[in-house]
């Protein structure tokens, strides 16, 4: 998300960093570039105009002109303005109500409402320690109810059954009564998607909203629709008292226009981002952290939180102890590291949160391919426990068997074994303080072919 915007803003601000002082002329040139970058990111025109005008006004201020590092001051101005546009801070769910607190999911068809309902149930259960029930009031879309039932079982929430011959209002009432009887904390109500904002469907959801009186009414919207997402949110807000927005499919959106437009156009905060298809791919939206990502400064706080939440500490501790003692690093260890990486969204997700990644050349970043990680895991899964411990045993016949079992080819097995042999050498150097020496040795930075490719260690 924001890849194109990050690149454009980065190059514009870097030019100013290299200049001794800011003048009316170079600020004007920079603002033209910023304006074009935002428009290309599909940010709504009124938001672009307001954004650029505010930055220009602040940049022409006396404080910036007198600054010894005017380029850095301008970066701070842009950062502060990005935060202001997206919302000053993360706005959490308001669950301060007599249980069960009801969350109503609304949005257009295909925006990811049902998946988001399951993701939210998982997030509430794992990070807020809440007991959650989910119910589908979508009696129009085939298999919508079955989809939520399947996802509910996956995330471990209570599922309230419903059927297409029932009325949405009756389904919601019955679910609310059942949630009360079971003393559950939260009830998430998934509603039917609208292909467009039509009167009949809006009347139905208005009636539903008025009857169950939710504490949170979340608008689920596809980020890839750009500024149309903001316009759809505005239309829904005129019909329903929305309390926030969930922006989905952000992992497939390189522009990010919706995130920069929604708050200013609707006045409603973005509360969550959907960052993938899996049920754990939901994260709270922090405007300050997102601004930092846009400017290529990374998001270390979110990265730390993700590691805390998803890394298996027991396995990590065993692995660290093994390395410290200098015991053999084998293919099973390698596989476990790859699996930990996948659970955290893959290399591309981690790189997005690391500071300074915008300065790494594209040919290095392009070596990062999460599909290669999946292939690596598949190859190791096709090996016997003995082969994982003693890779030197893997010769001709064994290679062919592993290739057939993993759906790959023998050259790919050879490539993995070669990369692994290099990794073993690195691991041996880590024994007895070798890690610190090694890090000093690579201070020169990343060069061609030295990026964190599929043969590299995730941690």
Image (spheres, rainbow, N blue to C red):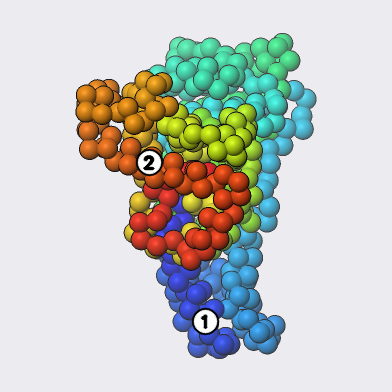
In space, the residues marked 1 and 2 are separated at their CA atoms by 43 Å
Q: Which of the 4 image quadrants contains residue 208?
A: top right
Q: Which residue is drawn at 69% across and 25% down?
A: 130
Counting residues from the start of the chain, the first of labels 1 and 2 encountered is 1
In this picture, residue 135 sits left or right of residue 176? left
- The residue shown at (28%, 34%) is 413
**Callout 2 crowding tier (Cα within 10 Å): few <14, some 14–19, many ≥20:** some
The relative height of residue 198 versus residue 347 in the rendered view (above or below) is above
| Element class at badge 2 | helix
Mark 1 Cα-neighbour bin, 10 Å: few <14, some 14–19, many ≥20: few
Camera-side mark, 1 or 2: 2
Residue at the spot of label 1: 18
Percent across and percent down for residue 325 are 59, 37
**Residue 306's image quarter?**
top right
Q: Name the residue under label 2.
A: 421
Residue 291 falls in image quadrant: bottom right
Left or right: residue 202 versus residue 321 is left
Is residue 404 toward the left or the right of residue 233 in the image? left
Task: State the residue at coordinates (51%, 74%).
Answer: 13
Q: Is mark 1 on a helix, strand or loop?
A: loop
Residue name at image x 72 percent, y 32 percent: 95
Is residue 360 among the parts visible in the rendering? yes
Q: x, y percentage for residue 360?
A: 43, 62
270 and 399: which is toward the camera: 399
């Amino acid at each position: 998300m924001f890849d194109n915007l990050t690149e454009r803003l980065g190059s514009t601000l870097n030019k100013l960093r290299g200049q001794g002082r800011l003048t009316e002329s170079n600020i004007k040139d920079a603002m033209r570039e910023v304006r074009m970058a935002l428009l290309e990111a599909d940010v709504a025109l009124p938001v672009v105009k307001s954004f650029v005008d505010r930055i220009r006004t602040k940049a022409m201020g006396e404080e910036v002109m007198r600054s010894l590092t005017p380029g850095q001051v301008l970066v701070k101005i842009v950062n502060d303005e990005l935060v202001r546009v997206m919302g000053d801070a993360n706005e959490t769910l308001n669950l301060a109500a007599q249980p069960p607190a009801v969350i109503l999911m609304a949005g257009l068809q295909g925006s990811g409402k049902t998946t988001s309902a399951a993701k939210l149930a998982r997030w509430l259960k794992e990070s807020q320690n809440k007991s959650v029930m989910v119910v589908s009031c979508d009696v129009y879309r085939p298999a919508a109810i079955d989809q939520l039932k399947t996802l509910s079982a996956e995330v471990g929430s209570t599922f309230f059954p419903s059927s297409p011959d029932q009325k949405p209002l009756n389904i919601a009432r019955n679910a609310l009564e059942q949630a009360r009887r079971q003393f559950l904390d939260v009830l998430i109500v998934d509603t039917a998607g609208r292909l467009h904002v039509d009167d009949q469907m809006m009347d139905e959801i208005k009636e539903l909203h008025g009857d169950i009186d939710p504490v949170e009414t979340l608008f689920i919207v596809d980020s890839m629709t750009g500024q149309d997402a903001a316009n759809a949110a505005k239309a829904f807000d005129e019909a329903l008292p929305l309390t926030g927005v969930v922006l989905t499919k952000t992992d497939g959106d390189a522009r990010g226009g919706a995130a920069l437009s929604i708050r200013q156009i609707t006045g409603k905060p973005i509360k969550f981002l959907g960052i993938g298809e899996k049920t754990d791919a939901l994260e709270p939206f922090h405007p300050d952290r997102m601004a930092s990502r846009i400017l290529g400064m990374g998001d270390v706080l979110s990265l730390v939180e993700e590691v805390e939440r998803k890394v298996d500490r027991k396995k990590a501790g065993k692995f660290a102890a093994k390395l410290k003692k200098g015991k053999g690093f084998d293919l099973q260890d390698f596989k476990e590291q790859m699996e930990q990486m996948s659970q955290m969204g893959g290399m591309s997700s981690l790189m997005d949160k690391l500071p300074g990644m915008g300065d790494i050349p594209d040919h290095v970043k392009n070596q990062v391919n999460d599909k290669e990680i999946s292939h690596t895991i598949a190859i190791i899964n096709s090996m016997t426990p003995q082969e994982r411990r003693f890779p030197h045993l893997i010769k001709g016949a064994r290679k062919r068997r592993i290739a057939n079992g993993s759906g790959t080819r023998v050259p790919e097995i050879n490539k993995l074994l070669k990369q692994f042999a290099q990794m073993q050498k690195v691991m041996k150097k880590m024994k007895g303080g070798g890690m610190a020496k090694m890090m000093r040795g690579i201070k020169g930075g990343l060069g061609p072919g030295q990026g964190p490719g599929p043969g590299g260690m995730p941690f």
